[in-house]
Image: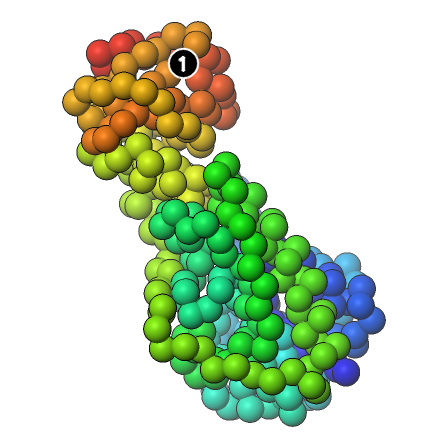
């Protein structure tokens, strides 16, 4: 079976590696154009492009796929199926219709829960006990197509978006290979109308911590926004990133520092409190609470905004 692959970030690169390792012929790889990245803002190839080039695969990087001319390389690749994973461009119906077996998508949630751009983060933020991967037959709607394969995965209490991403990327890579091998015999199952939720794109402003919320909710947000955009506690004019925190005992006005010493850095929330265990000041490194307090002295009674 000849495969055309479309994807951009690390999540997709894991799947591409698995497809290649399984022996499928990949006739074309679509990925987003190189983008400026890092402090120097130098153009950087996507993780998928780097993987494709490492295997000597042809790469196509259209800015958009709205006109017929942009579809020509996809037609020429003559794929039996297109596999899509976090590509980042909308595929019009004309593109979905090109492969004989259609286009199948690797989605990091148990559809129809968490359709959309940020299913990993939203599942943690919502306090879901489990998530998973769905292999879906694509159609014009946003993650609305029938499901070919699905598999659940528990969300651990300490999972961050980063750790859960890696678990789901490995799961998705394994499932897409299984789906391709079984494609002729798989039966697409329509998604139920009940239980639909949307995982809206993460905005940078969401990282700002509102201490009037409960410790449970804030703890979830800290894990959900690690690594992007990072949860931020505002101390005067200084934004401090909070990378990890655990529930703690204590009560006071929200944002009040209850304890700041070598043992703990505890902050009161709207309900309960959090012990901040890993922090980062602007321009600094991630530090344990004890190390952070040596370079940035906070005191009991101080308040985060």
- State the residue at coordinates (36%, 69%): 196
Estimate the x, y position of residue 292 in percent, counting from the top left: 44, 16
User: Does 147 sit above or below residue 244?
Assistant: below
Instruction: Say which residue label 1 marks.
Output: 264
Q: Quadrant of residue 98?
A: bottom right
Residue 27 relative to residue 221: left or right:
right
Which residue is nearer to you in this view: 200 or 48?
A: 200
Say how the picture is coloured: rainbow
Estimate the x, y position of residue 202 in percent, counting from the top left: 37, 53
Q: Residue furthest left?
A: 253
Quarter of the image where the C terminus is located: top left
Q: Is residue 46 visible?
A: no
Which residue is nearer to you in this view: 176 or 196?
A: 196
How many tags in the picture? Answer: 1
Classify mark 1: residues with Cα within 10 Å, few (<14), some (14-19) or many (20+).
some
- State the residue at coordinates (40%, 14%): 264
Which residue is nearer to you in this view: 249 or 36?
A: 249
Residue 45 relative to residue 297: left or right:
right
User: Does 206 sit above or below residue 197?
Assistant: above
Task: Report helix, strand or loop for mark 1.
Answer: loop
- State the residue at coordinates (42%, 48%): 124
Quarter of the image where the N terminus is located: bottom right
- State the residue at coordinates (41%, 77%): 192
Q: Quadrant of residue 268?
A: top left
Q: Quadrant of residue 236?
A: top left
Estimate the x, y position of residue 105 in percent, counting from the top left: 56, 73
Q: Is residue 198 visible?
A: yes
Estimate the x, y position of residue 60 in percent, counting from the top left: 63, 73
């Amino acid at each position: 079976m000849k495969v055309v692959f479309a994807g951009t970030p690390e999540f997709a690169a894991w799947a591409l590696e698995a497809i290649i390792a399984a022996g499928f012929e990949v006739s074309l790889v679509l990925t987003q154009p190189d983008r400026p990245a890092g402090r120097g803002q130098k153009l950087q190839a996507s993780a998928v492009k780097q993987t494709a080039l490492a295997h000597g695969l042809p790469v196509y990087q259209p800015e958009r796929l709205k006109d017929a001319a942009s579809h020509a390389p996809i037609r020429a690749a003559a794929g039996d199926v297109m596999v899509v994973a976090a590509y980042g461009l909308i595929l019009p119906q004309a593109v979905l219709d090109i492969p004989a077996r259609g286009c199948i998508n690797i989605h990091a949630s148990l559809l129809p829960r968490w359709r959309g751009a940020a299913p990993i983060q939203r599942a943690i933020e919502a306090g879901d006990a489990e998530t998973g991967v769905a292999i879906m037959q694509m159609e014009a709607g946003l993650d609305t197509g029938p499901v070919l394969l699905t598999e659940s995965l528990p969300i651990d209490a300490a999972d961050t978006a980063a750790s859960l991403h890696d678990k789901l990327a490995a799961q998705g890579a394994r499932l897409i290979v299984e789906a391709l091998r079984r494609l002729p015999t798989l039966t697409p199952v329509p998604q139920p109308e009940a239980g639909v939720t949307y995982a809206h794109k993460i905005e940078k402003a969401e990282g700002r911590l509102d201490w009037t919320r409960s410790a449970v909710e804030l703890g979830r947000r800290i894990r959900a926004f690690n690594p992007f955009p990072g949860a931020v506690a505002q101390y005067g004019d200084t934004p401090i990133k909070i990378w990890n925190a655990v529930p703690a005992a204590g009560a006071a006005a929200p944002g009040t520092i209850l304890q700041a010493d070598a043992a703990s850095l505890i902050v009161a929330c709207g309900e309960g409190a959090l012990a901040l265990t890993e922090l980062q000041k602007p321009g600094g490194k991630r530090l344990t609470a004890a190390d952070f307090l040596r370079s940035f002295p906070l005191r009991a009674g101080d308040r985060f905004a």
